């Protein structure tokens, strides 16, 4: 198959994380999602909790940094945007570093954009029908359907804002991906099998 980096963008509650895990298992390659925070923290020396608070979120406000207890990391004269920049740069370096180590699956974190010049890049986007997503989130987080729908809309908005702000592309737009899959139609295993097969066919 050669060196393949499979990036997965996903709607919240679509099962994108589970699909990514299954793809990695099928292909026998590494999987990175929240694991990137650990990689970024180790390489940058930044606190993992600090990095997680900025994970796939666009947060430019000083008030946010104060509330999250990060004001102490703001260097004199630099402002809150410098704090966010530190987190984004650490995550970017983490994506680049894991891609150097060989074939892997990376979920989110603008990895498709960061690695756009990588010759073995395969860009995937996972979506699902809203009712299926509501049921999935409600069951997974043990919350009422109405609360699950509210969380879905909030998370999708956050991911979209983060992606659109940090790239010159549109989150979820088909032209930015090599393969878009509605997991409601084929299930987690089906989506993973499609991606694994596709990865083997891409030249």
Image (cartoon, grey):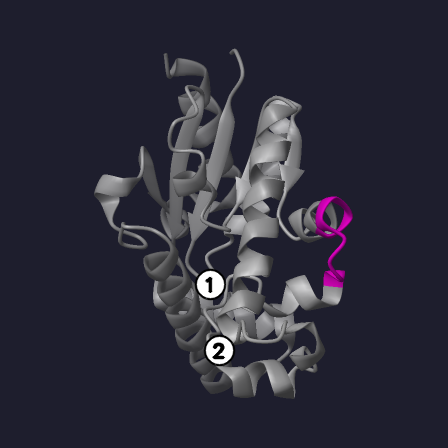
The residue that mark 2 highlights is: 151
The residue at the point 43 percent across, 63 percent down is 159
Distance from label 2 to label 1 (Cα)? 9 Å
User: Can you tell which mark lies on residue 12?
Assistant: 1
Q: Position of residue 72 (x, y in %)?
A: 71, 78
The residue at the point 32 percent across, 55 percent down is 171
Q: Nearer the viewer, residue 202 or 25?
A: 202
Whether label 2 touches label 1, CB < 8 Å: yes
Mark 1 Cα-neighbour bin, 10 Å: few <14, some 14–19, many ≥20: many
Q: Position of residue 140 (x, y in %)?
A: 62, 68
**In the image: residue 190, left or right of residue 33:** left
Where 126 falls versus 118 (above or below)?
below
Q: Which of marks 1 and 2 precedes in the sequence? A: 1
- Magenta segment, which residues? 41-48
- Helix or strand or loop: what does disc 1 sit on? loop
Question: Disc count in the image?
Answer: 2
Which secondary structure class fits the magenta region best? helix
């Amino acid at each position: 198959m050669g060196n393949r980096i499979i990036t997965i963008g996903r709607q919240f509650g679509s099962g994108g994380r589970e699909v990514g895990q299954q793809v990695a298992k099928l292909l026998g390659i590494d999987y990175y999602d929240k694991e990137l925070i650990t990689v970024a923290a180790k390489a940058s020396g930044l606190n993992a909790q600090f990095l997680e608070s900025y994970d796939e979120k666009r947060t430019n406000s000083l008030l946010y940094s104060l509330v999250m207890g990060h004001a102490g990391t703001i260097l004199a004269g630099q402002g809150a945007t410098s704090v966010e920049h530190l987190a984004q740069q650490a995550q970017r370096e983490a994506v680049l570093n894991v891609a150097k180590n060989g074939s892997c699956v990376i979920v989110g974190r603008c990895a498709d954009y960061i690695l756009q010049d990588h010759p073995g890049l395969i860009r995937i986007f996972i979506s699902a029908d809203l009712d299926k997503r509501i049921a999935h989130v409600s069951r997974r987080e043990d919350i009422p359907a109405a609360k699950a729908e509210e969380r879905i809309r909030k998370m999708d908005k956050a991911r979209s804002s983060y992606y659109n702000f940090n790239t010159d592309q549109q989150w979820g737009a088909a032209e930015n991906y090599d393969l878009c899959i509605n997991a409601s139609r084929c299930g987690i295993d089906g989506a993973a099998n499609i991606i694994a097969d596709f990865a083997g066919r891409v030249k």
